[in-house]
Image (cartoon, helix red, strand yellow):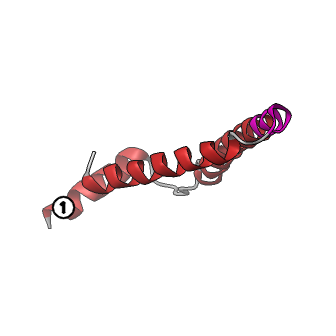
Amino acid sequence: MNLADNKSNEVSAVLLNNYLGLLSSLTLEYQMQLSQRLSYNISRSEKKSKISTEKLVNQFYGAWLSDKSAKDMLDEIKADRRK
């Protein structure tokens, strides 16, 4: 971990503690609602990330079109390296 990461983690910890201080004044009911909303938001973000990764993979899967065989392409690459 580098210095920038340490500084970022320290700032995040301070922010988290400040938020917790503010939130502790909420009623238990509002704290529960906030917890549910945060959990929902996190799970939705994870699903979006997974879907985006799958879309990206599917978008480029098989994108290379050529009539040459893999062996022919490798032979061509090796020949170009020798020049």
Q: Quadrant of the C terminus?
A: bottom left
Percent across and percent down for residue 49 are 64, 46
Q: Residue at x 47, y 49 (%)?
A: 14
- Left or right, residue 64 beside residue 31: left
Q: Residue at x 37, y 53 (%)?
A: 73
Q: Residue at x 21, y 59 (%)?
A: 79
Percent across and percent down for residue 25 are 72, 42
Q: Quadrant of the N terminus?
A: top left
In the depicted view, which residue is nearer to us: 83 or 48? 48
Main secondary structure type of the part rendered in magenta: helix
Q: Residue at x 65, y 43 (%)?
A: 54
> Is residue 64 within the magenta segment?
no
The amino acid beneath tag 1 is Arg
- Left or right, residue 58 beside residue 27: left
Residue 46, compared with residue 5, is above or below; it is above
Which residue was labeled with disc 1?
A: 81
Residue 13, compared with residue 7, is above or below; it is above
Magenta-colored span: 27-35
**Mark 1 crowdedness (10 Å alpha carbons): few <14, some 14-19, many ≥20:** few
Badge 1 marks a residue whose secondary structure is helix
- Left or right, residue 78 beside residue 13: left
For the image, the number of numbered tags is 1
Percent across and percent down for residue 48 are 71, 46
In the depicted view, which residue is nearer to us: 7 or 73? 7
State the image quarter where residue 35 is shown: top right
Q: Residue furthest bottom?
A: 83
